[in-house]
Each structure stands twice: as C-alpha cells, then as structure tokens.
C-alpha cells in the first residue's frame, strides 16, 4: 500500500516528482493539462526523458493522471461529447507516454436523460478513446458522491458501464469521500465488508486499481462532494484505520486530494497521518 498525493505538474511532469518527494509521497497524481480548459499539448520528449530519470532516482510508485473536469460522456450535445472524447484521448496519450498507471476521470452527469439512456453512448466513447490510443495505461472511472444527475454513485452503475465498454484497460478509482457521501459506510467494519462484497459482485475487486484518500466534511449519504483532511472529517482516523486494515486495499495505491493543513492542497502532515495508520495496521 503506497501513500501518495495529487501534486502540481507546473513546469512539466518531471517537476511533480520533486514536489511529491518533498512531502514524503511514494506515488503521485497530476493533471496533464489544465482541468478547466479543453486545450492540451502533448508531453514533450525532453520532459519524458527527465521524468523517467527522476522516477528512477526516486523509485516512485505508479503515477496517475486526473482527467479534465469538463469531460461529459453522458451529454446529449454532440459537440461537448466530441470535445470530451478528444480530451480523454489526449490524457491517455500522455499517460502512455509517461508509462503511467492510467487516467482517472469523473463519469460526470447524464444531464437528465437517465442512466439507462447514456450507457451505450458512454461505452462507445470510452472504447473509441482506447482504440485510438493503444498502450498499457488504464482508463479508471471514479466513484461519484451522487449529487444531482451524476453517474457512478453506486457500484452497480459503474459495473454496468464497465461491462458495456468491454475493454480490459478499464478499471476503477474508489474515492473514500465520494463513496461515504453516496451512502457506503466505509468507516465501520461490518458495513465496509458489505461495501467491498458489493463492489466485488458488481465490478470485481481486481478492477480496484487506485484510491483517492479523502476524509469527509459532510455526513454519510449526503451526496455532497466536500473533502477534508485525514482524521479531521466524519470518516475520521478510526474510519481510515478500519479501511486500511481491509485486505482489498493492501496493494492499492492511495492518492490524497485533501485541502491540506495550510489550505494549499495535500501536504506532509496528511501523508504522515496515513503512513502512521498504515504502520499500525501492518499494511506497509
């Protein structure tokens, strides 16, 4: 179980490695380009070379890229759908170039059409992106908190999409805050076990490839996406101890997306909190 965090890739992906190293991260997540703009430039070969050298020097664990927040594969707007496919293709191309584990993206909203109505379109788009960018990097659907028309707040929905896509490069990133907000009580052993059993039944536990490790500002079942620092939220230190004790997470990398103790994003105190819990439960 590696403990990492989302860090800035300003100046190039190779710069992110030093930033991760500074806070004690063992792996990290980055944006390949601005998450709030459609434009994206290919990763330069010089950056790839520097990145590879730094990864070898630091022996960092798997890198993941986070997709753009603008992506909406459930949209009925052909122009938005096309832009979403192009953006995801650029991200998976960057992931392949960096030999990253994969791209994590939000399934986003069905825009009032209903989940059943968008399954085929969503699956077709993901298949198109992966076919256009062959390689080893995965496309990981992220669990949703469930607000409004958002897709993926239940493991059944994610499992349905994955089966419809039918590509072995598709996997899942479980966000601890999102699933808690969606009503899965992962902070208590009995209900965590039930959630993992449901995940295995609907998706397959082997497809759990990454965890976004975030405590929750909002209560269980709130459907509100609000991250809190580890131990300061409603999942709490005890909840993360329970979670990290479970065998399902033993070999899955954790990536922090918390506000940070100084409100400047994931930091060393949060890394250290997770490392301490990992040590206590013997998952290191």
Image (cartoon, rainbow, N blue to C red):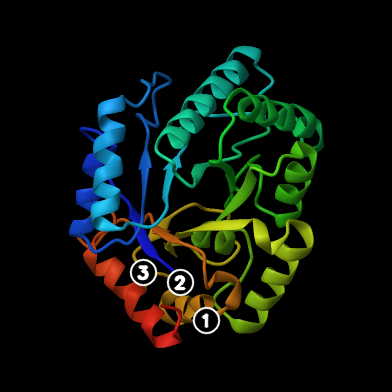
Q: Which residue is mark 3?
A: 230
Q: Position of residue 6 (x, y in %)?
A: 34, 50
Q: Which residue is mark 2?
A: 234
Which quarter of the rendered picture does the C terminus lie within?
bottom left
Q: Position of residue 158 (x, y in %)?
A: 70, 48
What element does badge 2 sit on? loop
The residue positioned 49% from the left and 76% from the top of the image is 244
Q: Disc 2 or disc 1, which is closer to the eye?
A: 1
The residue positioned 63% from the left and 41% from the top of the image is 150
Name the quadrant containing residue 196: bottom right
> Which residue occupies the foreground of this view, 170 or 237?
170
Whether residue 70 sits left or right of residue 190 in the image: it is left
Q: Disc 1 or disc 3, which is closer to the eye?
A: 1
Q: Disc 1 or 3, which lies upstream in sequence?
A: 3
Q: Which residue is mark 1?
A: 245
Label 1 – label 3 distance at C-alpha: 16 Å
**Label 2 crowd bin: few (<14), some (14–19), many (20+), radius 10 Å:** some
> Which residue occupies the foreground of this view, 149 or 211?
211
What element does badge 1 sit on? helix
């Amino acid at each position: 179980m590696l403990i990492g965090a989302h860090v800035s890739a300003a100046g190039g992906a190779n710069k992110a490695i030093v930033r991760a190293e500074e806070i004690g991260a063992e792996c990290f997540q980055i944006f390949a380009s601005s998450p709030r703009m459609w434009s994206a430039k290919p990763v330069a070969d010089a950056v790839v070379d520097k990145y590879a050298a730094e990864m070898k020097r630091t022996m960092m664990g798997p890198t993941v890229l986070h997709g753009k927040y603008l992506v909406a594969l459930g949209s009925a707007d052909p122009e938005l759908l096309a832009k979403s496919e192009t953006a995801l293709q650029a991200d998976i191309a960057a992931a392949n170039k960096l030999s990253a584990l994969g791209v994590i993206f939000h399934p986003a909203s069905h825009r009032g059409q209903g989940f059943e109505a968008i399954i085929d379109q969503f699956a077709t788009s993901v298949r198109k992106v992966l076919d256009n960018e062959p390689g080893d990097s995965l496309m990981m659907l992220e669990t949703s908190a469930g607000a409004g028309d958002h897709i993926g707040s239940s493991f059944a929905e994610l499992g349905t999409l994955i089966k419809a896509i039918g590509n072995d490069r598709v996997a899942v990133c479980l966000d601890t805050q999102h699933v808690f907000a969606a009503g899965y009580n992962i902070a208590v052993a009995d209900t965590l076990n039930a959630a993992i059993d449901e995940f295995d039944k609907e998706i397959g536990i082997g497809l759990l490839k990454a965890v976004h490790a975030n405590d929750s500002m909002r209560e269980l079942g709130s459907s509100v996406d609000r991250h809190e620092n580890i131990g300061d939220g409603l999942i709490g230190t005890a909840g993360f101890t329970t979670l990290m004790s479970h065998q399902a997470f033993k070999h899955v990398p954790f990536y922090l997306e918390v506000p940070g103790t100084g409100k400047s994003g994931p930091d060393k105190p949060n890394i250290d909190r997770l490392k301490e819990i990992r040590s206590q439960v013997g998952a290191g």
